[in-house]
Amino acid sequence: MLALGIACTVAAAVWAYLAVGHGGYWRASQWLPPAAGAPSRWPDVAAVIPARNEAAMLPAVLPTLLGQDYPGVLTVIVVDDCSTDGTAQVAAELGPGPGLDRRALRVVTGAPLPPGWAGKVWAMAQGLDAADLASAQAPGRDGAGPGEPGYVLFTDADIAWQAGALRALVSAAEADDRDLVSQMALLRTATRWERVVVPAFVYFFAQLYPFARVNAPGSGTAAAAGGCMLVRREALTRSGGLAPIRGARIDDVAFGRMIKRQRGRCWLGLSTRVVSVRPYPGLADLWRMVARSAYIQLNYSPWLLAATIAGLLLVYAVPPAGAVIGLAAGAATGPAALAAGAGLAGWALISLTYLPMLRLYRLSPLRAPGLPLIAMLYAAMTVDSARRHYAGHGAEWKGRTDRTRLRWLRGRQSLGGQGGNGPLAPLPDRRRVHRHPASGQPARGVP
C-alpha cells in the first residue's frame, strides 16, 4: 500500500505540472483572432488535396472549398493518387459553378510512388508542382503577369469548409505575418465510439504538442494539423519544397517542424469551421486510424514503447486505482490514506483538464472521469501498432503498407517524429529530376 501511495503522489505531482506548466495544452484556448481588417490585396491561394480512393468523400468536400467567399484567386488541385474508385472522374464533375469566376479546379493524375517517398507526401508534392506551374494562368487575375506569391493550402479529402473559413485563415496569416497557419479540424462524433475516442485523440495530440508552445516563436515545439495547413510559398521555397519530409509518415508534424526549423512563424489552433466528415462507425475503424501511426510516433523504438506504456500506466491508471483501493481499505492507515488522497487529487486533475475538450465537442462533463479508461484503450492501440509493424503491416492505409518490418538501418528513411531529416533513396533512374523554381519540388520526370 505504501508503494501505491508513493506512486499516486508522483502521479499527482505530474498532473500538477501538466495542469500548470505544460503550455496550457488542456485549455482549448488557441483560436484564430477576429480579423482586424482586410489585406490591401488578397493573395492567390492554391489548395492541394491528396485524394486516394476518395470518391465517396469529395462530393461533400469540394463544393464547400470551391464555394468559399474568398475575394482572391483560388485554385483547387485534386491529386488522384492512383485511385481505383473513380476519384478523378468524381472530382472533375465537381468544378466551380456559375458565378465563381475567380475559381479553378484542376485534377492531376498522380504518378506511381517512387522509393523513399511516403504516399501522401508524394501526392502533396505533385499538387504543389502543379500549383506552381498553373500559377500564372489562374482565373480572375488583373493583368497578364504572374500574381502575388500567395499561399498554398494543404487539406485533406475529408475536410469540409464552412463559410468564411479560408478568408479567416488568410487574414490571420497576413495580419500576424505567419508563414504557417494550421487548424485542427473538428472531427466527427456522430457514433458512440467516435464520442469516446475522438475528443481524447485531440486532447492527447495537444498534450504532446501544446498549441501555445507551437505558436511561440522562441519555442522548440513544432507541429501542424494535416487537414488544414496554409503556408506561404516563400516558406516552401526556402525549405526546398517538400523534399526534406519526403519519407514522413506523420507528415503534418514533420511539416510544422520543417517550417519552424527555418525560423518561420507558425500558428496552430482549434476550429469549428474546418470540419472532418469522414465517418468512423465502429471501434475497429478508430483502432486502425490510431494504430497505423502510433508506433511511427515512437520512432519504431521498443524502448520508447515500453517507456510510453509505463508512463501511461503511472499517469492515467495509478490515480484512479489508488483512489479506489485506498478508499476500499477505509483510509484507516497512513499508506491507505496517502493512496486515497493522492489518487483522488490526480484523478480530479485528469478530469478537470479534460473538461474543455468535452465542451468543445458538446459532450457531457460526466465523461471526464472516464479519461483513464480511454488512455488505457490508447495504450492497447499503441501496443497493437507495434505488433502490426513487426508483422509487416505497419502504417497500412488505403491499400499501402510501410514494408520496413525491422528498422535496423534507421537512417534509411525519415520519420514524421524526426521532422524528415534522414537520407532517402533517390528517385528512380528512369526519371530525371528537375526542381521547380518556385517550390523547389521535383517536377514530373522527363523520359
Image (spheres, rainbow, N blue to C red):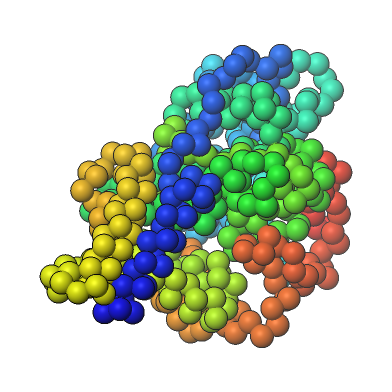
Residue visible at 63% across and 51% down in the picture: 222
Residue visible at 39% across and 45% down in the picture: 187
Residue visible at 86% across and 54% down in the picture: 434
Q: Quadrant of the N terminus?
A: bottom left
**368 to 295, vertically: above or below:** above
Would you say residue 306 is visible in this rendering? yes
**x and y percentages locating residue 188 in the rendered image:** 35, 46
Question: To which quarter of the image does residue 37 belong?
Answer: top right
Q: Nearer the viewer, residue 100 or 198?
A: 198
> With 326 as the anchor, is 291 left or right in this view?
right
> With 92 as the anchor, is 18 left or right in this view?
left
**x and y percentages locating residue 369 in the rendered image:** 25, 55
**364 to 423, vertically: above or below:** above
Would you say residue 236 is visible in this rendering? no
Q: Nearer the viewer, residue 223 or 399?
A: 223
> With 436 as the anchor, is 214 left or right in this view?
left
Question: To which quarter of the image does residue 12 belong?
Answer: bottom left
**257 to 275, vertically: above or below:** below
**x and y percentages locating residue 11 in the rendered image:** 39, 65
Q: Quadrant of the C terminus?
A: bottom right
Please count the marks in the image.
0
